[in-house]
Image (cartoon, helix red, strand yellow):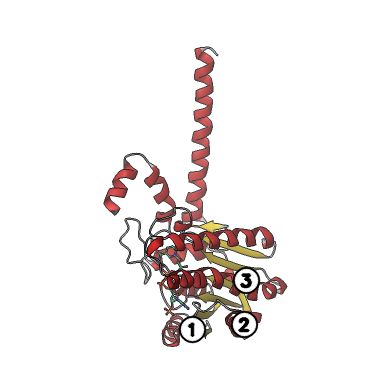
Amino acid sequence: MDNKHLVNSLALLGFFQAARLSYSVAKSFIKYFVAPRRDLKSRYGGGWALVTGASDGLGRQYCFELAKSGLNIILMARNQEKLDKVAGEIRAEYPDVKTKTLVFNFSELHTEEQISALQKLLREVKEDVSVLVNNVGVLAVNHFDKHSIQDCMNSISVNVSTQTYVTHALLPVMLQRSSRCAIVNLSSRAALVMHPLFPVYSGTKAFNYSLSTALRNAYSDKIDVLTVTPASVKSGMNPGNGLFTVTPEMHGKYVIDHLGRYDDTWGHWHHAIAPYLEATPLLGHIILRIQT
Ligand SMILES: NC(=O)c1ccc[n+]([C@@H]2O[C@H](COP(=O)([O-])OP(=O)(O)OC[C@H]3O[C@@H](n4cnc5c(N)ncnc54)[C@H](OP(=O)(O)O)[C@@H]3O)[C@@H](O)[C@H]2O)c1
């Protein structure tokens, strides 16, 4: 190849790379700053949104965002007092929205009897549910050799078994509803960047990601399945010291804005740009130094 051909080929390659990058930046800009929230109440035929881990953190914020869209809310966690408080706050802010609470300890999903107890509880509400938010999760921070068996069992029960069995209990009814339905699955950036101090957590979040993708591939004609992969959100689970940490309020708005429009979301746009900035030579190094 002579020099002229080489220069032309490299110019063409550069042009295609620049076009690809521009397209991807434009798509993200529309996703995070332009696309309006869908009318979720009419898209999902009214009905109720069931949110696991609803008494705190991200789950609590999803309840407020879904209530803002006019959906009634079923709040599920293990502490009745905390659930009642959040339910009361939702009704005070959105007087037309109804709430129900369900108390269940998701750490206890190891035996058939425990799974039956969950199914029995969900039987009370499952006809009503048009939106399921599989949010509950726990984080054990330690090297794997320092994890107790109890840490492992708890993480697997809350993060893996809960998503599996709650979805399994509600999906058949959702598929029979006349309107579309939705399932929001909380994974994490930890599913993609496996942190050495989050070994079991990263594994469970990878499970959440995979199950979510498989469900979308199977049921997208009837169900909007949204996979959420946040980085750092300040909450009971996370003291929030990261450079890109956002509040549950900042995060939750974007997740519900993306419901019914996209297959996956980071939540807040800070979390969408963080991986690119961290991968940039020198800048990535500076970010890493600031964060540690
Ligand atoms: N925060 C982050 O930076 C971050 C980042 C990526 C992904 N996520 C994911 O986001 C989801 C929510 O995390 P979060 O930060 O909001 O956590 P959080 O602030 O600790 O809140 C957890 C919620 O789950 C409930 N819960 C915990 N253990 C439970 C159990 N055994 N049975 C029933 N309910 C239980 C808690 O309720 P009670 O204790 O009141 O019962 C609370 O409502 C998780 O799936 C997590 O993996 C979080």
Would you say the residues marked 1 and 2 are in contact, meaning their CB atoms lie under 8 Å apart? no
Is 190 on the left-hand or right-hand side of 213?
left
User: At which x and y percent is residue 59?
Assistant: 46, 72
Residue occupying the point 61% across, 79% down: 112
Estimate how packed mark 3 is, as few (under 14), some (14 to 19) or many (20 or more) residues with alpha carbons within 10 Å. Answer: some
Disc 2: which residue: 116
- The residue type indicated by label 1 comes to Pro
Of discs 1 and 2, which sits in the foreground? 2
Question: Are circles 3 and 1 on residues that touch, CB within 8 Å?
Answer: no
Label 3, on which residue? 42
**Residue at position x 51%, y 30% in the image:** 15
Q: Quadrant of ligand 1?
A: bottom left
Residue 225's x, y, as percent? 60, 63
Seen in the picture, residue 105 relative to 175 is either above or below; the reply is below
Q: Disc 1 or 2, which lies upstream in sequence? A: 1
Q: Quadrant of residue 212?
A: bottom right
